Image (cartoon, rainbow, N blue to C red):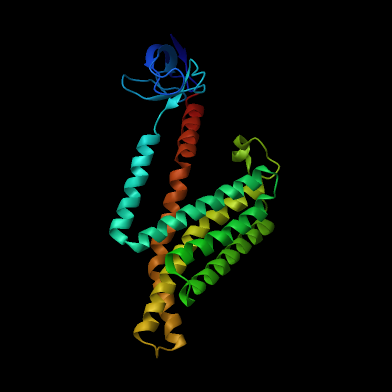
Amino acid sequence: MSREGTRGAEEHYYTQKITARILNGAYKGKEITLSNEYTSSQVQTQKYHKGDTVLLNGSKDRPGKTIRSVKRDIYLVVLVGGLIILLIYITRKQGGYTIVSVILNTLIFAYGFQLLGDGKNILRICNVIALLFSLTTLICLNGIHRKTWAAVLSTLCVLFLIMMLFDFSIHRYGDLDYSNLEYLGSMSNSADIFWTDIMLTGLGAIMDVTVTISAATGEIVRKNPSVSIRKLIHSGREIGYDIMGTMINVLLFVLVSGMIPMFILKMNNEIRFITL
């Protein structure tokens, strides 16, 4: 069967008759027959092949008759396990600290979303988790000493300054158009969601720069304890100049990669409008 797609292209529809064997639960080892419908584009549906391990829409006691998705947890465990082994093997103790920081940040992020589900204010949650992210990441990776506290303080100060500039721009030149956030299902707090997005996106880049500068200046002080404050500030500024270009481009690449689908959709709509 074929049908016209959303952009005028012909879309073909197929139905698969699949014989599957249940691998766990009360019906382990039993063969069942499944039906799967998919399209030629496979945008919202998927074609399954012999040997695929899939998840069914059901439970262990009632497996269900439809497929939810391909079972990929084994591959994810292998990838994560390989990453952990490489981190520990290459960086030794520092790799272990990195893993601990990732686990702690994941728990903080999950707890923040749990509070958000309970109806808490997203801005207050984001302010707290941004502080916790900075503390856990920098302390786990650098330890507790003056260089770490300098990095934490500079991270929070720069983040505060950036958000104040963002707030000033909004009040000076008018609010943004949040129509692209309609897919969230609620437009009541779109400005708060965008604010938290900006804050958490910039936090990682800010921490990267502050750790680089604080580590470099700390090494300068260790090698030359008699260095003056003026020369130390000058050295930190020169380091910032050197890494500024690459960091801006990194943020640009992250932004562009996330907006590629929107660019393609906009381009297709404009082409379609012109052809009409």
Please say if 111 is above or below 28. Answer: below
Please say if 82 is above or below 43. Answer: below
Q: Residue furthest bottom?
A: 226
**Residue 4 versus residue 122: which sits nearer the camera?**
122
Q: Residue furthest front?
A: 26
Image-quadrant location for residue 91: bottom left
Image-quadrant location for residue 162: bottom right
Residue drawn at the location 43% of the way across and 45% of the way down: 257
Image spot of residue 242 (x, y percent): 38, 69
Q: Is residue 154 left or right of residue 257?
A: right
Residue drawn at the location 46% of the way across and 68% of the way down: 210
Q: Is residue 158 left or right of residue 222?
A: right
Please say if 235 is above or below 274. Answer: below
Q: Quadrant of the N terminus?
A: top left
Residue drawn at the location 46% of the way across and 54% of the way down: 102
Image spot of residue 88 (x, y percent): 32, 57
Image-quadrant location for residue 32: top left
Tell me, yes or no, if residue 254 can be seen here. yes
**Residue 132 versus residue 246: which sits nearer the camera?**
132
Please say if 187 is above or below 223. Answer: above
